[in-house]
Image: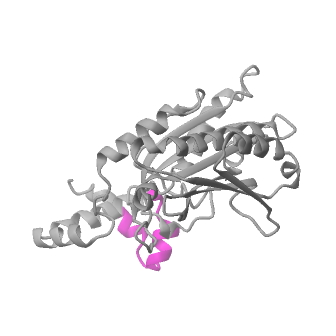
């Protein structure tokens, strides 16, 4: 890449002159100017890298190691997962990067747990946040249309993500694939949006887990853990849980009322655990309602349910 415009570089250096470096970079420079400065710094740094150092970095950097799972296994899983999606879900392929702050602004996630780029983006670390923005973008187009403002947007994706915090255990890696679902819409009263979409997502994951034997993943039992933040929905969950238990012999459902402080989910959160043939239970799916589309659209009538299942984890522990 050629050097950035010399006049532009000179102006940026002049603006930071005689200021504390951190204060200047954070508060004085705009994001485009900071990007230009960092691009030039890394261009100059890269010119000093020799091929031996490059190769050493490739072999030692945990972020650059290939997945240990064979591509065919991913393909088989994705084909199965997409084929079982409810008819009104649309599968999409996300970009590998998202806008800077996609996790830390929408959700209380430390920015240092995300791989930030110098082009004012970040490597995707959680597709649910990006799906929320895509969902809000589509909902924004529907809201002004009287006959369509209650129309729900339902999206699904399989996305490789990267997280920078250190993980422990054989089933924990720096980058991995996640299957994510989301549904966004408008409050229909009596918690109908919440109950209908919760039922649909839980049914989907139970069905998917029951069909994994087709790709050599054998799940002997499933447990759903419902964590309730809103007492009003707890009284209405029986209609869902009774239906699920009747239809699935190897299913167990636990429900707890959460009384502490919660700054990520609202209304309800669900965890799904799967047991392998050795009788070992693993946490494989997390979902719940959030305020993300409310915030993105500045509209308290918006509702949003999102979830994610770790694909890598399934292969590593099953």
Which secondary structure is most common in the magenta stretch? helix
Relative horizontal placement of residue 249, taking residue 83 as reference (left or right)? right
Magenta stretch, residue numbers = 11-31
Name the residue located 46 percent from the left edge and 71 percent from the top edge.
Answer: 165
Q: In the image, is 1 to the left or to the right of 272?
A: left
Quadrant placement of the C terminus: bottom left
Name the spot of residue 248 as percent of width and height, x first.
Answer: 66, 43
**Where is residue 270 shown, x and y percent of the image?**
68, 54
Image quadrant where residue 243 sits = top right
Q: Residue visible at 54% across and 46% down?
A: 209
Q: x%, y% of residue 233?
A: 84, 49
> In terms of depth relative to the viewer, which is nearer, 163 or 280?
280
Q: Does the rendering let one see residue 303?
A: no
Comparing 133 with 171, the one in front is 171
50 on left or right of 164: left
Q: Would you place residue 2 above or below residue 148 in this image?
A: below
Q: Residue furthest top?
A: 147
The answer to which of 171 and 176 lies nearer the viewer is: 171
Res 188 visible: yes
How many numbered circles does the render carry?
Answer: 0
Q: Is residue 26 magenta?
A: yes
For residue 34, side relative to residue 26 (left or right): left
Residue lying furthest left: 51
**Front position in the image: 19 or 179:** 179
């Amino acid at each position: 890449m050629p050097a950035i415009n010399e006049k532009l570089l000179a102006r940026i250096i002049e603006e930071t002159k005689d200021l504390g470096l951190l204060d200047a970079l954070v508060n004085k420079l705009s994001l485009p100017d900071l990007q230009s400065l960092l691009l030039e710094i890394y261009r100059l740094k890269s010119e000093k890298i020799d091929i031996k150092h490059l190769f050493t970095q490739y072999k030692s950097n945990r972020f650059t190691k290939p997945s240990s799972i064979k591509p065919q296994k991913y393909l088989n899983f994705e084909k199965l997962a997409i084929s079982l999606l409810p008819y009104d879900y649309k599968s999409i392929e996300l970009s590998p990067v998202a806008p800077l702050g996609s996790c830390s602004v929408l959700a209380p996630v430390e920015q240092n747990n995300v791989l930030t780029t110098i082009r004012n983006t970040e490597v995707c670390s959680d597709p649910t946040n990006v799906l929320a923005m895509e969902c809000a973008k589509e909902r924004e187009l529907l809201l002004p249309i009287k006959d369509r403002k209650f129309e729900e947007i339902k999206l699904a994706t399989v996305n490789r993500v990267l997280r920078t915090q250190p993980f422990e255990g054989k089933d924990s890696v720096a980058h991995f694939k996640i299957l994510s679902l989301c549904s966004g819409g408008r409050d229909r009263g009596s918690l109908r949006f919440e109950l209908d979409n919760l039922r649909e997502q839980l049914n989907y994951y139970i069905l998917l887990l029951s069909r994994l034997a087709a790709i050599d993943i054998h799940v002997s039992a499933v447990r759903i853990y419902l964590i309730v933040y809103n007492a009003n929905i707890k009284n209405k969950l029986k209609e869902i849980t009774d239906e699920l238990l009747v239809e699935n012999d190897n299913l167990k459902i636990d429900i707890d009322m959460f009384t502490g402080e919660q700054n990520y989910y609202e209304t309800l959160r669900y965890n799904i655990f799967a047991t392998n043939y050795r009788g070992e239970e693993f946490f494989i799916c997390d979902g719940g309602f959030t305020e993300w589309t409310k915030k993105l659209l500045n509209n308290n009538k918006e509702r949003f349910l999102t979830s994610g299942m770790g694909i890598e984890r399934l292969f590593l522990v099953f």
